[in-house]
Image (cartoon, rainbow, N blue to C red):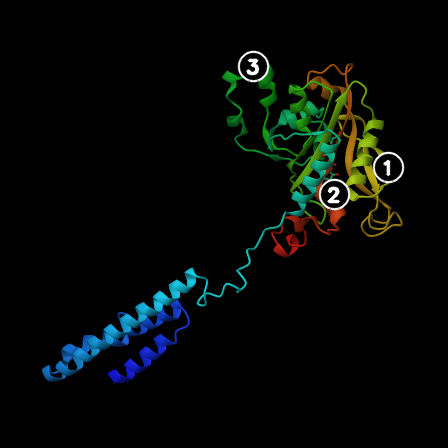
Amino acid sequence: MIEDIKKEALELIRSAKDSAAVERLRIRFLGRKGEISKILRSLKDLSVKERQTVGPVAQQLKKDIERLIQEKTAVFSKSIQQGLPGIDITMPGKKIKIGYLHPLTLIEKEIRGIFKAMNFSVVEGPEVETEYYNFDALNIPKNHPARDMWDTFWLQNSQQLTSDKEQLTKGQESKVKGQMLLRTHTSPVQIRYMETHKPPFQIIVPGRVFRYEATDASHEINFYQIEGLMVGKTVTLANFKFVIQEFFKRLFRSDIEIRFRPSYFPFVEPGLEVDIRCIKCGGRGCGICKDSGWLEVMGAGMVHPRVFEAAHYNPRDFQGFAFGLGLERMAMIKYNIPDIRLFYSGDLRFIQQF
Ligand code: YSA
């Protein structure tokens, strides 16, 4: 029986193709539960005479196998160092999976680039905002019906967050009075920026906003906006028209027809909505534009004098335009995405298409 094991073990070890196979054979014959180890362990159960014959043969076989394994392992490690057979260096490597940029990241980067090229600066503001910046300073006082336009996530215990009154001056105190909330639009950053900067300037403000409303194919509770603000001594709606036409031309890489429609936002006067010719049907009417031939893409207008006053500007000295667009809606138009909820589904099949 020992002879059979010896024949098989030596043959197998000699023909092993790589060091992993040698290791498997070492375990099979010499491991704790290996075939040779079992024989050596069973010697104690044999008679003295049997032990004297079997013992030395088994010990010798163990030594032979150990030596052969050592030799074989040395051959493999040498061939690895020399790049010789034993390791197939032509075998394709394991593919490293790279990630994908989310379509919202892609379009935001592109929009930032377009505005930067037109000399706009990119500014950011807090997502947790005070009632003052989100509403009051934007000419939306308490009980004003316009507050209904923004369904708000109010924060609990917000008084604690803002009650460190000892360190606040009177002016500062009025800005933190009232409840804290998740900002419903990026417009509060208009005030924050103007408080610390003097015109002329032009900025865009990309950022996340929140609305407490039912979701559907075009509404989310968490979405992104890009705010724009340009202020100077002579900035007019004609400047706005040029900037925004140029923006769409660069974003969609073709001449896009736009139109202004009168609208109402408390922080602009006059206020307007900007529509673009439907990208899908070119204006003939389709499901995307609900047969109107136009897509509503942003709110805009000339900054209201009360907004300038809130930022301590004299409205007689400066004028400017502001606008706010929804990033998801823009991406849906550009990439032909039918449902806003896909952006937040976490489905890799969606992301991998960009
Ligand atoms: C208007 C005039 C200005 O001078 C400056 C800014 C604005 C925009 C204003 N602050 C505002 O938020 N207007 S809005 O409520 O109409 O939203 C702007 C854009 O956000 C919409 O055109 C739409 O594209 C997007 N939006 C609104 N609610 C949304 C949404 N996107 C996804 N889900 C929602 N629930």
Instruction: Identify which residue, 27 or 313, lies in the foreground.
Output: 27
Residue at left offset 80%, top offset 32%: 243
The image shows residue 350, relative to residue 72, as above or below, that is above
Secondary structure, mark 3, is loop
Q: CA distance from mark 1 to mark 3?
A: 46 Å
Q: Does residue 250 appear to the left or right of 183 in the view shown?
A: right
Circle 2 SS class: helix
Name the residue: 39% across, 67% down: 20
The amino acid pointed to by label 2 is Met
Question: As displayed, is residue 345 above or below residue 319?
Answer: below
- Ligand 1 closer than 8 Å to the CB at disc 2? yes
C-alpha gap between disc 2 and disc 1: 16 Å
Q: Secondary structure at mark 1?
A: strand
Q: Is residue 318 left or right of residue 341?
A: right
Ligand 1 resides in the quarter of the picture at top right
Q: In front: 143, or 231?
A: 231
Q: Residues within 10 Å of mark 3 (few under 14, many from 20)?
A: few
Q: Position of residue 188 (x, y in %)?
A: 66, 28
Q: Alpha-carbon neighbours of circle 2 within 10 Å: few (<14), some, or many (≥20)? A: many
| Residue 247's disc number | none
Residue on which disc 2 sits? 330
Counting from the top left corner in percent of width and height, residue 303 is at 76, 24
Left or right: residue 277 versus residue 347 is: right
* Residue at which label 1 appears: 259
Q: State the mark number for residue 169.
A: 3
